[in-house]
Image (cartoon, rainbow, N blue to C red):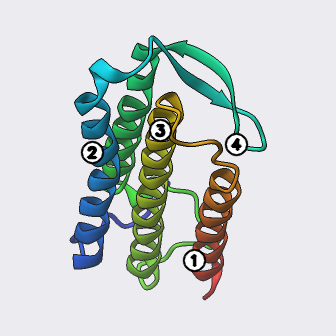
Amino acid sequence: MTDRPIIPIPKTKLEWLLDGLSLLALAVPTIYLFMIWGDLPAEVPIHFNAAGEADGWGGKGTSLILPIIGLLLFVGLSLLRKIPHHFNYPVTLTTENAEKKYRLSIQMLSWLKFEISLLFGFILWNLVRTAQDHAESMGWLMPVALAAILGTTISYTVRIAKK
């Protein structure tokens, strides 16, 4: 692994855009949570069943876990961007193909960061809306999110594996 070339890959405009949108996806529901904090009931939904209906409840302080985990994932994935030479690749890296493979893996990370931030933002938004009795279910969210995340991972893995 140490014989792989270390190539600095500058951030693209798309990455900057996706990072901004990721932070926005986390910030908007978090700001909304703080704006209505005093109006939230003492217990908020903390678990949703497969149909997307709330089936577990906890103190409203537990709702702070989602933005914290979302932000930690954002930071962690942002830091991973700096070390693409340490990633596992489905092909042998050479000095000729390393930069292209690194760029593709960094693009994949950027899209995954965006999709995960959206997921955490939507879950927090729905958690708050459900606690306020404004939402019934979020049954569509998990299948769509999983399809997007798996689709991105598979699509980029195939592209990285090509010669």
Locate residue 39, reporting x and y percent: 33, 22
Label 2 element class: helix
As shown in the figure, which amino acid type bears the numbered disc 1? Ile
Residue 52 visible? The answer is yes
Residue drawn where x is 59% and y is 65% of the image: 89
Q: Nearer the viewer, residue 67 or 112?
A: 67
How far is the residue under mark 1 from the one under mark 3?
Answer: 40 Å
Instruction: Check disc 3: other Cα within 10 Å, few if <14, some if 14-19, many if 20+.
Output: some
Locate residue 48, reporting x and y percent: 68, 33
User: Which label's residue is closer to the chain start, 4 or 2?
Assistant: 2
User: Which label's residue is closer to the chain start, 1 or 3?
Assistant: 3
Position of residue 51 relative to residue 144, above or below, is above
Q: What is the total number of numbered labels drawn onto the structure image?
A: 4
The residue to which callout 4 is attached is: 52
As shown in the figure, which amino acid type bears the numbered disc 3? Arg
The residue to which callout 2 is attached is: 27
Marks 4,3: beta carbons within 8 A: no
How far is the residue under mark 1 from the one under mark 2?
Answer: 32 Å
User: Which label's residue is closer to the chain start, 1 or 2?
Assistant: 2
Instruction: Check disc 4: other Cα within 10 Å, few if <14, some if 14-19, many if 20+.
Output: some
Residue drawn where x is 58% and y is 24% of the image: 46
As shown in the figure, which amino acid type bears the numbered disc 2? Ala
Residue 129's disc number: 3
How far is the residue under mark 4 from the one under mark 3?
Answer: 13 Å
- Of tags 1 and 3, the one toward the viewer is 3
